[in-house]
Image (cartoon, grey):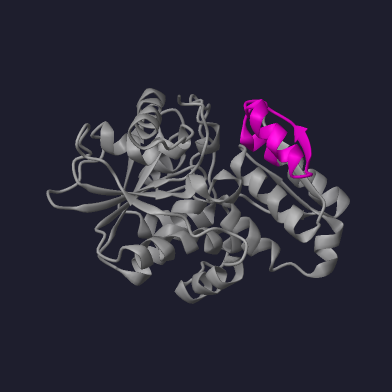
């Protein structure tokens, strides 16, 4: 089992990434036209460099590498956002970056990756198939593979988001966090529970990709037989042991939302706040708008808007 980051490790990661990622806004949601059922705050990681929280984990990992590994190059497989973050990290450090993507990734994200100077390879129908190809190439060519969610350095980097939220608003009662492979909620859950043990950490997955929902229920890693969501950044068929262990300990509950509910939430964010969030980025808000997660009366909730895009508009 990989070493699980602690609060000191996450604080060190915050110092590491401070000069190369943004401290993103935390804003109050507008309750007047469409109540969210609680005092709700929106953490706008959609305004993070490259458009998502993923830059935190990628930069923290890259800065831990020895110079010879950076010179040889880095590689990953991604549903899109982690690939952008690794490409950005490569650009920052002048490291060659290779990004494997499944065929479901939108052309706009491929264009962004190429703009950051990455080599893009499209392989397979889902992330898991692209990932197998990327790991084989990493071994064959001696490239450093940066896992999107099952790496303690990545998890610590994502955990800096939990630190930042509670520094901005310490009286929050609950954090609502989208789940793909589990890297974001692992880091945020570790940081938030260490800083404020009584806070609730609520996970949100698509109904068409309930990877960790099913794994937590089964108390073992479950590989989904198929993916049935267009929110590709939330859609691995299988998570990893480190993420399942952390989620089982630090996440209070997981709820499922449909693609239509995420689309409605993305539209609400745009029309009410001018926030362009991709479907996965709107998943946390979808849980509140749809009533899948119902906060207690008076609960102060932060929903993470974790990725920018226009696929829901």
Q: Which residue is drawn at 58% across and 59% down?
A: 21
Place of residue 171 in the rendered image (x, y in percent of width and height, measured from the top left): 25, 64
Position of 239 relative to 282 (above/below): below
| Residue 135 highlighted magenta (yes or no) | no
Q: Which residue lies furthest to the left in this view?
A: 297
Start-end of magenta stretch: 103-131
Q: Is residue 149 left or right of residue 112?
A: left
Place of residue 165 in the rendered image (x, y in percent of width and height, measured from the top left): 38, 60
Quarter of the image where the C terminus is located:
top left
Q: Is residue 132 left or right of residue 294?
A: right
Place of residue 271 in the rendered image (x, y in percent of width and height, measured from the top left): 36, 29
Q: Which residue is drawn at 26% across and 48% down?
A: 40
Q: Residue at x 69, y 37 (%)?
A: 112
Quarter of the image where the N terminus is located:
bottom right
Count numbered badges in the picture. Answer: 0
Can you see residue 245? no
Decide which of 66, 169 is in the foreground and name it.
Answer: 169
Position of 186 relative to 255 (above/below): below
Position of 115 relative to 260 (above/below): below
Place of residue 169 in the rendered image (x, y in percent of width and height, measured from the top left): 31, 63
Decide which of 241, 110 is in the foreground and name it.
Answer: 110
Quarter occupied by residue 154: bottom right
Quarter occupied by residue 18: bottom right
Can you see residue 30? yes
| Residue 111 highlighted magenta (yes or no) | yes
Decide which of 76, 223 is in the foreground and name it.
Answer: 76
């Amino acid at each position: 089992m990989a070493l699980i980051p602690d609060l000191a490790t996450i604080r060190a990661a915050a110092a590491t990434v401070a000069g190369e990622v943004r401290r993103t806004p935390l804003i109050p949601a507008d309750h007047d036209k469409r109540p969210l059922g609680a005092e709700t705050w929106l953490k706008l990681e959609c305004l993070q460099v490259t458009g998502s929280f993923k830059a935190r984990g990628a930069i923290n990992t890259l800065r831990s590498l020895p110079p010879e590994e950076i010179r040889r190059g880095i590689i990953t497989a991604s549903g899109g956002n982690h690939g952008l973050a690794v490409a950005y990290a490569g650009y920052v450090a002048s490291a060659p970056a290779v990004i494997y993507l499944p065929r479901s990734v939108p052309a706009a994200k491929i264009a962004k990756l190429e703009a950051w100077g990455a080599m893009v390879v499209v392989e397979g129908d889902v992330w898991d198939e692209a990932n197998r190809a990327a790991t084989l190439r990493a071994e064959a060519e001696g490239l450093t593979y940066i896992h999107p969610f099952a790496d303690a350095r990545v998890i610590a980097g994502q955990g800096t988001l939990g630190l930042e939220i509670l520094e901005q608003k310490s009286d929050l009662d609950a954090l609502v966090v989208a789940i793909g492979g589990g890297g974001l909620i692992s880091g945020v859950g570790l940081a938030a529970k260490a800083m404020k043990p009584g806070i609730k950490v609520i996970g949100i997955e698509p109904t068409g990709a309930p990877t960790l929902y099913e794994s937590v229920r089964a108390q073992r890693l479950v590989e989904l037989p198929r993916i049935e969501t267009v929110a590709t950044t939330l859609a691995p068929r299988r998570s990893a042991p480190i993420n399942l262990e952390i989620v089982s300990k630090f996440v209070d509950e997981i709820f499922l939302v449909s693609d239509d509910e995420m689309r409605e939430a993305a539209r609400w964010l745009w029309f009410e706040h001018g926030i362009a969030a991709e479907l996965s980025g709107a998943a946390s808000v979808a849980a509140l708008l749809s009533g899948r997660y119902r906060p207690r009366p008076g609960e102060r909730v932060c929903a993470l808007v974790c990725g920018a895009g226009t696929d829901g508009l």
